[in-house]
Image (cartoon, rainbow, N blue to C red):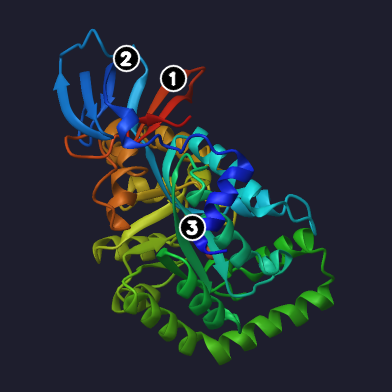
Amino acid sequence: MNDIAATRAFRREIGAAHDFPAPAAEKGALAINARRIVLADREIAGVIHIENGVIVGVEEGAFDAAGLSFGDDILIPGLVELHTDHLEPHYSPRPGVRWDPVAAVYSYDAQIACSGITTVFDSLRAGDDADRNALGAGLFALGEAIERAKAGGLLRAEHFTHLRCEICAPDVLDEATGYLARFDVRLMSLMDHTPGLRQFRDEEKLRAYYRVKAMKSEAELDAFFESRKAAHAALHDRHRRDIVRLAHARGVALASHDDTTLAHVAESTADGVAIAEFPTTLEAAEASHQAGLAVLMGAPNVVRGGSHSGNVSAIELAENGVLDILSSDYVPISLVYGAFALREVKAIGGLPGAIRTVTRNPARASGLTDRGEIAVGQRADLARIAWTNEQPVIREVYRAGSRVA
Ligand SMILES: [Fe+2]
């Protein structure tokens, strides 16, 4: 059976009646009135007009009696998420358990869309590390499942792949090359989780993490840490060079990961990196931002008030004017919570500035120019937020003008 026949059979099998979003012909025109519409630089009251999935008019102070009315709820662009590993727990909800991969993608996508996210980069790990051992061949199973779910018209959000490359892993080049040959990858990141470096330069914190997570004894941890350091010495430089080359050859955007020192930032800049994910120090974040890299931090870090690894806090970077992007990391709903919390930071530029960190900034940094703000010509990816009990509540989500959540 060829791919098209397989997809048709799959759609029959799942009884797919409607794609998300609906085909353009069904969309027609739509107007939305709201007293709080968050543009890229300010808030207005008025109406937006949508045709065939695209915003064709933004009228301040106007009202369209034939349109929807969102009252006092806040209308923002659909969120753009660059780094979420939340698919993994849907695929492996218990140690040793594998859920049907397409069903895992489907339920994960529903959580993503209900969190206001209309564009998501699913982060999948290439290269074996201690965390990923549990997933086995999950990388390719999940890549396949995302493609099948997309082809079946099952997905509410638009999905791209962010291939996270653990560069000191012996199998990282094989996995990255194999994945790139089969699937569409839009972002690759350069990870190095060697004990004593970067995210885990405080080795004791990493020991505490593995003591609980992997229930390893001290002797086992000693041996494990030694093997990770030996792999770093043997493989880091060569693998990093090859992964960078692979990304550039395919025109895939690159992200650094956990840069800590000025030397790390200089290396990332020389490697043509566009996004600095989770810099661990203010020094590295400032240097990255000044070099024109978009600095990305975890929204859970904002919501919880600090880094779970004991590194620099996202709020501190925002206060210093060097935070560009938030990512939900491991909790999808944290993205909207984090953005609303950020509006309290003076240097961020109010609610419009806070919302930019989860919409326009991640879209532009990853090369997407057709979405990320409420403006004429942009895709009508939108989220309706009610401010209730001091919390942002997602009421409705639209992708390209069609309601998806
Ligand atoms: Fe990390």
Check if mark 3's residue and mark 2's residue have beta carbons within 8 Å.
Answer: no
**Which residue appears at 52% of the width and 41% of the height?**
112
First along the sequence among labels 3 and 2:
3
**Which residue appears at 34% of the width and 51% of the height?**
362
Q: Give the crowd class for mark 1: few <14, some 14-19, many >=20 residues within 10 Å.
A: some
Q: Residue furthest bottom?
A: 234
Q: Which mark identifies residue 387?
A: 1
Q: Give the crowd class for mark 3: few <14, some 14-19, many >=20 residues within 10 Å.
A: few
Report the front residue among 227 and 115.
Answer: 115
Residue 330 visible in the displayed image: no
> Which secondary structure lies at badge 3?
helix
Q: Is residue 305 above or below residue 176?
A: above
**Which residue appears at 65% of the width and 70% of the height?**
203
First along the sequence among labels 2 and 1:
2
Amino acid type of the residue tagged 1 in the rendering? Trp
> Which secondary structure lies at badge 1?
strand
> Which secondary structure lies at badge 2?
strand
User: Residue 180, image x and y in percent?
Assistant: 46, 73
- Quarter of the image with the N terminus is bottom right
Report how far apart the C-alphas of labels 2 and 1 lie in the structure.
19 Å
Q: Which mark identifies residue 4?
A: 3
